[in-house]
Image (cartoon, rainbow, N blue to C red):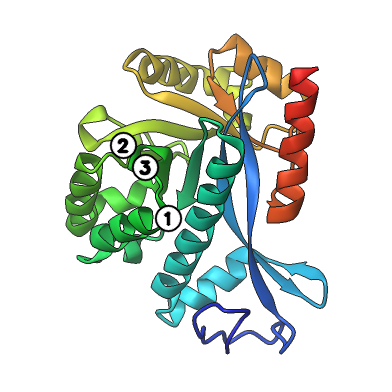
Amino acid sequence: MQLNGTPAINIQNNAMSIDTSLEVAFQPILETNSLNLVGFEALLRVISENEMLPTQQYLHSAASSNDIEQLDRWVIEESINTFSEWAENYHQPLYLNINLSEATLARADFPGFLQYTLLQHIVYSENVNLEIDARYLANPDCLANISVLVELGIRFTLNLAHMDESAIADKGYGFSSCKIPASWLSDNSNNQHWLETLRAMSERGIQLIATNVETSGALQQCSDLGISSFQGYFSAKPLPKADFECWFLNQTEITEN
């Protein structure tokens, strides 16, 4: 199935139709205390008959059919191209966060592909952040490519979606930041150990980014705990390219005024 310029993806999914299309949406990442935009995350969205389909279901189908690497590369090229356009137009010191599958990160030719794409769009490697799950660290091919990419200046974020102490990031792996769910930040007895762990990570120079921040109360918890940045519906949901650009221009105007 050819989807709006994307690679042909073999999706075995009855919910898919001939009108199905893919797009890259963008969600802002804001500095906790100032609410200034510091970066944005590129997120795949699946649209069918003007309705959004569950993205995880689509990604699972792509992974099962071994098409996830093509899909990853399409998202990387689309998001880096957009980042390049915005950098040229607005001259803001932002970074781009891209989620990456284990299969793509493990490929021997992936560092070369990423470096070529950055050169093609004149984007500096230090402006790109690759987000990965902790389970990738058990794959020696992933670790080898992380080492190569860190040498090239690429930054990595470890997504700590589960409270697994063995997944705590260490600078030796090249991680500059960790993502943590906002639900971890509630000050209760079950979370005390994790709050101490997060403080220790912060003291080691690892930036903490809270996800799923939806209320002013959650934002206040981030501030109280020294979480440097956040993303979530409190600021904005993932937006298509044109809508994100309108949001960005509106925020810039508000800041300048």
Secondary structure beneath disc 2? Answer: helix
243 is higher (above) or lower (below) than 72: above
Mark 2 residue type: Ser
Q: Which mark is residue 124?
A: 3
Q: Are marks 2 and 1 in contact (CB under 8 Å)?
A: no
Q: Which mark is residue 99?
A: none
**Which residue: 43% across, 24% down?**
207
Q: Position of residue 67 (x, y in %)?
A: 43, 78
From the image, which quarter does the N terminus lie in? bottom right
Q: Earlier in the sequence, mark 2 or mark 1?
A: 1
Q: Can you tell which quarter of the image residue 45 is in? A: bottom right
Mark 1 residue type: His
Q: Position of residue 144 (x, y in %)?
A: 17, 52
Spatial CA distance of label 2 from label 1 is 37 Å
Left or right of 45: which side holds 168? left
**Which residue: 33% across, 66% down?**
103
Spatial CA distance of label 1 from label 3 is 9 Å
Q: Position of residue 185 (x, y in %)?
A: 59, 23
Mark 3 residue type: Tyr
Spatial CA distance of label 2 from label 3 is 32 Å
Q: Which residue is mark 1?
A: 121
**Which residue: 65% across, 15% down?**
34
Q: Which residue is mark 2?
A: 166
Dot 1: few (<14), some (14–19), or many (≥20) neighbours within 10 Å? some
